[in-house]
Image (cartoon, rainbow, N blue to C red):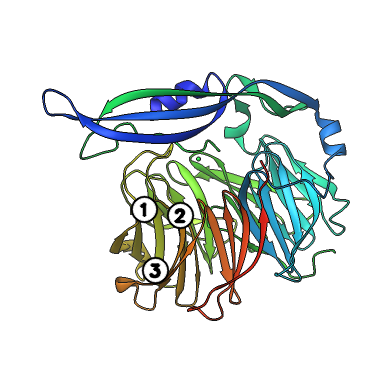
Amino acid sequence: MKKNSILILTISALTAYVFFLLPGCSKDGTKTQTQRYTYTIYSNPVYKSRSAVLASINGDANTAIQQAGKLYIKDNFIYVNEVNKGIHIINNSNPSKPVQVAFLSIPGNLDIAIKGNILYADMYDELLALDITDPHHAILTNSIKNFFTDRAFIGNYIANDSNQVVVDWNQKDTTVEWTTTIDPGGCNGCFFETLNSSAAPSAKSTGTAGSMAGMVLMNNYLYAINEMHSLGIVDVSNASNPKLDSSFFAGYDLETIYPFEDKLFLGSMEGVFMYDVSDPAHPVSAGQFTHGTACDPVIADASYAYVTLHSGSYCGGDANELDVVDISNISNSQLLRSYKLQSPKGLSKDGTLLFVCDSTNVKVFNAANPSALVLMQSIASKSPYDVISGNKKLIVVTADGLYQYDYSNINAIKLLSFIAAKR
C-alpha cells in the first residue's frame, strides 16, 4: 500500500479518509475486505510571491480553526497549528475563557517551537524565526531556506522557492472502492487517514510541545526532522538569528521527537531511536527499540518510554496498542508490556497519570505501576489527535476543535472551555 500512496503523491497532494466495509469470503475460503477511500484532491496550486506571503504573515486574528494540527503551550498562551496554513495564538490566562488573539498566516506550516519571544515555524522547506513580542505584529528576524528537504515539492509542484510559495489549491472530493485479501499476519490494504500522516509572551525560555512534534528546543539548539531519515540541528543561542549547525542520519522513517533531560526520543515507523545530547551539538546514539511497522509518537520519563501504535495510516501495519518500554538500561531497552487499544495517537504524562488519545476517547490511566496500568477515566472526544497535560489542566486537539479540562479531581474531570473548529 505504501507504493500506491507514493504513486498517488506524484499526481497531486491530497487528504484521504478511510472507510472499512464488512469483510467477506471468496470461494476458496480466503477472507476479503472492501475498502472505500474518500479523497480530497488538491491540484492546480495557487502561487503567491514569497515577499507578499511574508508581508502578510500577520493574518486575521479572528481566523477560525478549521483543521487543528500540532499543539504548543508557553506561559499563558496556546499555539495551535492550522494544518498547512499557519498558527492560531490563543491567550489562555483564563482557561475557562480562552481568547484567540492572533493568527500567523504561514503556508505549509506543521510545526511550532518557541524560545523567549522568538517563534520558529516551518513554511514548507523553510525554517522561519519570528519575533512575537507583539503577537499581533510578528516580525521575521531570519530564516533558513531548504531546511526541510522532504517538503520542497508536493506532487509535481515546487511548494516553495526563492520567488513564490503555494498558498492554496483547487479542491475536489472523490470516492473509490476496492477489495483486498486480508492477511492475518499483516495489514494488507491499510492506507492513511490524513496526509500531512500551537499580550506578549513572558521571559520563560521555552514552551512545551505535544507528542506529535517534529521540532523541539533543548540546550540552545533546535532539533527537527528535516528529512524522512535525518535530524537537523540548528544553533539558536542567538534566538533571533538561527544558524544551521548540521544534519545527520538519525534513523529510518522518522516522525516525532520528544525531549527528556539529556535525551531525545525519535518516534519512527520502525520503532524508537534514542540519543544522548549531553553534548547538544553532537547527539550520540544511546539505544533503539524496534516494533512492527506503524505510526509511532513517543514520550518518556527517567525509566520508561510510552509508545502508541495505530493502524489505518500511511505508516502501514495493523497494530493498535500502547507499548511500555523499560529504558532504565537505555542501551538495552526492553518491552515491558503492550496494552491493546482502538486507534491510539498522541499522549502525555503528568506524574503517575498517563493520558492517551484513543479513537473516540482520551483515556486516563494510573501509571504508578507501568506493568499494570489501570484505566481511571475516559473523556469522550471526536478523534482526539494530541494532548498536553500539566498543573492539573489538560489541553486536547480533536477533529472538532480545542478542549481544556481540569483534572484536579480525577474522579470528576471538568470541561473548562471549547473552541470549535469551523469547516
SS at circle 3: strand
Residue furthest to the bottom = 409
Task: Please report the residue visible at 11 percent of the width from the left and 24 percent of the height from the top.
Answer: 28
Task: Please report the residue visible at 44 percent of the width from the left and 72 percent of the height from the top.
Answer: 302
Between residue 218 and residue 183, name the one nearer to us: 183
The amino acid at mark 3 is Tyr
SS at circle 2: loop
Q: Would you call the spot at circle 1 few (<14 residues within 10 Å), some (14-19), or many (20 or more)?
A: some
Q: Is residue 240 left or right of residue 347?
A: right
Question: In the image, which is nearer the foreground, mark 3 or mark 2?
Answer: 2
Question: In the image, which is nearer the foreground, mark 1 or mark 2?
Answer: 2
Between residue 22 and residue 4, name the one nearer to us: 22
Q: Is residue 287 left or right of residue 401?
A: left
First in sequence: mark 3 vs mark 2 = 3
Q: Position of residue 239 (x, y in %)?
A: 77, 57
The amino acid at mark 2 is Thr
Q: Is residue 219 left or right of residue 8?
A: right
Callout 1 touching callout 2 (CB < 8 Å): yes
The amino acid at mark 1 is Gln
Q: Check disc 3 and report the residue beneath it.
A: 304
Res 106 label: none
Q: Check disc 2 and report the residue beneath it.
A: 360
Task: Please report the residue visible at 57 percent of the width from the left and 33 percent of the height from the top.
Answer: 150
Q: Is residue 318 left or right of residue 392?
A: left
Res 342 label: 1
SS at circle 1: loop
First in sequence: mark 1 vs mark 3 = 3
Between residue 173 and residue 122, name the one nearer to us: 173
Q: Which image quarter is the N terminus in?
A: top left
